[in-house]
Image (cartoon, rainbow, N blue to C red):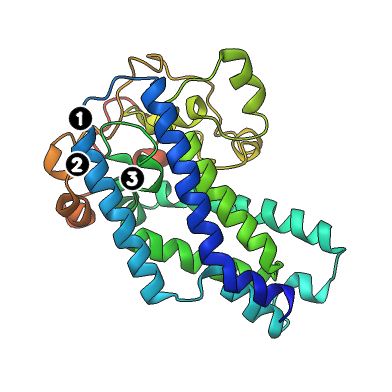
Amino acid sequence: MDISQSIAKYEAAIRLGCFFGIFGLMALWEWVAPKRRLSVSKTIRWTNNLGIVFLNSFVLRLAFPAAGVGMAVFAEAGHWGLLHHYPLPYWVALVASVILLDLVIYLQHVMVHAIPLLWRLHRVHHADLDFDVTTGARFHPLEILLSMLVKFATILLLGPPALAVVIFEVLLNATAMFNHGNVALPRGLDRVLRWLVVTPDMHRVHHSVEDDETNSNFGFNLPWWDRLFGTYRDQPRAGHERMSIGIRDYRDMKWCAWLPGMLAMPFHGRIGAYAINRRQWENSDAR
């Protein structure tokens, strides 16, 4: 059994172990030193947010049993992708693949904010009335399936090593839980860390009800793309403790906190010219 097949065999166990480990650490940190007071019952939010996480895991395994690492093994066997035709030293291919996969996720994130049909799916993530570790994994199943198809296409075009895909997936899940954490870092440490990784204070701005703040800080793992592409915002206008989290048009617990409402949200209401496509942010009624 070669290294790619070995990685594919243990990929699920590696990802599951890292998920529960990081989740436990972040949950403990939030309990000991929360950044903000929660506005909704933690029991209700966690039950329903984690409910959609487990539903998504089931749907993904049913639709794509091999996941991203399986696609990487398939691409390697068929010599699909640029890296199989223009070989690089293994460590260079490994690092470059992780960085390029992260760039694709950044671009995908911008896309789901810019295209009204896709925003219908993504607003399930943003409609959470609070911001904590469970928000980082709260996505509509259809968006999860779309995201996996984007990853598959990227893997086929790039041809990354299977190990790079596993590293990327573990980093993405870990940093998503970290940067959605309801935790505080010392200002000086946060200033340094946000050059290397997206911090909770950096990403919390993205969950503001204010349109111009929502449409900033799209990075999940690496923070460089927001700075390079002009979507970086340092702080929310109202401050982290006073800023409002969520979407203005969805403040009802029916949609924001309960699993049936989350699943139905993409099919509810109308979306016109979404704010990311507009120059005027004030008085926008299209959320």
Mark 3 or mark 1, earlier in chain:
1
Above or below residue 62? Residue 53 is above
How far from the left and from the top, in percent, is residue 214? 40, 33
Going by the image, does 166 lie left or right of 235? right
Q: Which mark is residue 40?
A: 1
Note whether residue 21 is visible: yes
**Closer to us: mark 3 or mark 1?**
1
Q: What residue sits right under mark 2 in the picture?
A: 257
Q: Label 3: how many residues lie within 10 Å, few (<14), some (14-19) or many (20+)?
A: many
Q: CA distance from mark 1 to mark 2?
A: 8 Å
Q: x, y percentage for residue 242?
A: 33, 15
Q: Residue at x 32, y 25 (%)?
A: 282
In the rendered image, the vertical position of residue 146 relative to residue 276, given as above or below: below
SS category of the residue bearing label 2: loop
Q: Amino acid at mark 1?
A: Val
Most foreground residue, 256 or 52: 52
Q: Residue furthest right?
A: 89
Answer with mark 1 or mark 2, whichever residue precedes in sequence.
Answer: 1
